[in-house]
Image: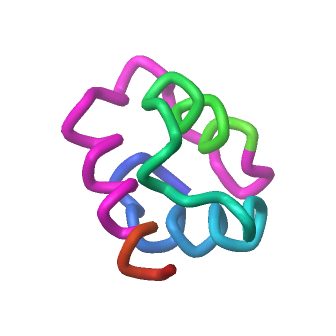
């Protein structure tokens, strides 16, 4: 997965953190959680606030 795979990341986060409300997750934690996903393989420097917002919105939609 890459940073642009927001839906796939959101689904993986739902599985990894089923009892977490995505609205309560700080972007610093969200970034780390994404990088901790076993399927994730992208450059951490390519992540910005807009990418994290897109991931968070996709995660909210999945919940």
Image coordinates of residue 31 in percent, x first then y, are: 52, 32
Q: In which quarter of the image is the N terminus?
A: bottom right
Please name the residue shown 40% across and 70% down the image.
60
Residue 3 lies in the magenta stretch:
no
**Left or right: 60 as drawn, with respect to 25:** left
Horizontal side of residue 46 vs 44, given as left or right: left
Q: Please tell me which residue is depicted at 73% across the width and 66% down the height of the picture.
A: 19
Q: Which of 61 and 45 is in front in this view?
A: 61
- Where residue 63 appears, as percent x and y from the top left, is 50, 80
Q: Quadrant of residue 35?
A: top right
Question: What is the tally of numbered marks visible in this picture?
Answer: 0
Instruction: Tell me residue 29's x, y (percent).
Output: 59, 29
Residue 47, above or below 63: above
Front in this rendered view, residue 6 or 29: 29
Q: Please tell me whether residue 46 belongs to the stretch shown in magenta.
A: yes
**Of 2 and 27, which appears nearest the observer?**
27
Q: Which colour scheme is used?
A: rainbow
Magenta segment range? 37-58
Q: Which of 56 and 7 is in front in this view?
A: 56
In the rendered image, the residue lying farthest to the bottom is 62
Q: Residue at x 30, y 62 (%)?
A: 57
* Vertical arrangement, residue 47 with respect to residue 51, above or below: above
Res. 46 image quadrant: top left
Along the horizontal axis of the image, is 13 left or right of 44? right
- In the displayed structure, 36 sits above or below 19; it is above
Residue 58: image x %, image y %? Answer: 36, 69
Q: Residue furthest top?
A: 45
């Amino acid at each position: 997965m890459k940073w642009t795979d927001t839906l796939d990341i959101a689904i993986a986060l739902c599985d990894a953190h089923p009892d977490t409300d995505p609205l309560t997750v700080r972007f610093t934690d969200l970034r780390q959680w994404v990088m901790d996903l076993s399927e994730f393989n992208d450059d951490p420097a390519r992540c910005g606030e807009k990418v994290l917002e897109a991931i968070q919105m996709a995660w909210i939609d999945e919940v």
